[in-house]
Amino acid sequence: MKEDCIFCKIAAGEIPAATLYEDDDFRVILDLGPASRGHALILPKEHYADLSEIREETAEKVLPLAKKVSAAMTKALGCAGINLVQNNGEAAGQTVRHFHMHIIPRYVNGPKIVAWEPGSLSDDDKIQIVKAVKAEL
Ligand code: AMP
Ligand code: ZN
């Protein structure tokens, strides 16, 4: 647990939060500034700043948990879709530096969120990006 990390304190139960689910590794809470009704956050109980730090053993449990909570939300809240959002770094919009995954239920009549203006991918850039990233994998 990291001093002064609000999500460490919430995950440990030291600060109260609306908890949807808890096990040895995770707490799932409602986001206090929801993008939509039911917007939730998966918080690991161990502190990792972001995806670059998370242990693989923990990381591999995140998606099955997101699937489980998403299925429950679909039944309980009647949402028509779900966005999983996971921000890493300030440039990506991460405001709390404790790894978390957003589960955002989406409804037929909005709100319209998680959207971007599509850019374009040039042939040159395509080749350069594929080469550069593949070399690091
Ligand atoms: P991110 O921008 O990906 O770091 O997301 C941080 C999220 O945490 C935001 O959606 C906030 O609304 C949410 N948040 C911040 N503090 C709390 C809190 N005490 N309880 C619940 N959600 C919180
Ligand atoms: Zn933390």
Image (cartoon, rainbow, N blue to C red):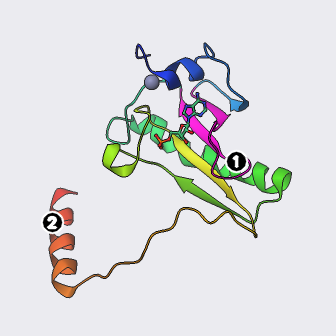
Question: Ligand 1 closer than 8 Å to the CB at disc 2?
Answer: no
In the depicted view, which residue is nearer to us: 2 or 55? 2
* Residue to which mark 2 is pinned: 132
Residue 126 occupies quadrant: bottom left
- Considering the image in quadrants, where does the N terminus appear? top left
- Residue at 65% x, 34% y is 28
Q: Is residue 129 above or below residue 45?
A: below
Residue 78 occupies quadrant: bottom right
Looking at the rendering, the stretch of residues picked out in magenta corresponds to 25-44
Label 2 sits on what residue type? Ala
Q: CA distance from mark 1 to mark 2?
A: 36 Å
**Lower sequence index among marks 1 and 2:** 1
- Residue at 40% x, 39% y is 56
Rendering coords of residue 35 (x, y %): 63, 51
* Residue to which mark 1 is pinned: 68
Residue 81 occupies quadrant: bottom right
Circle number at residue 133: none
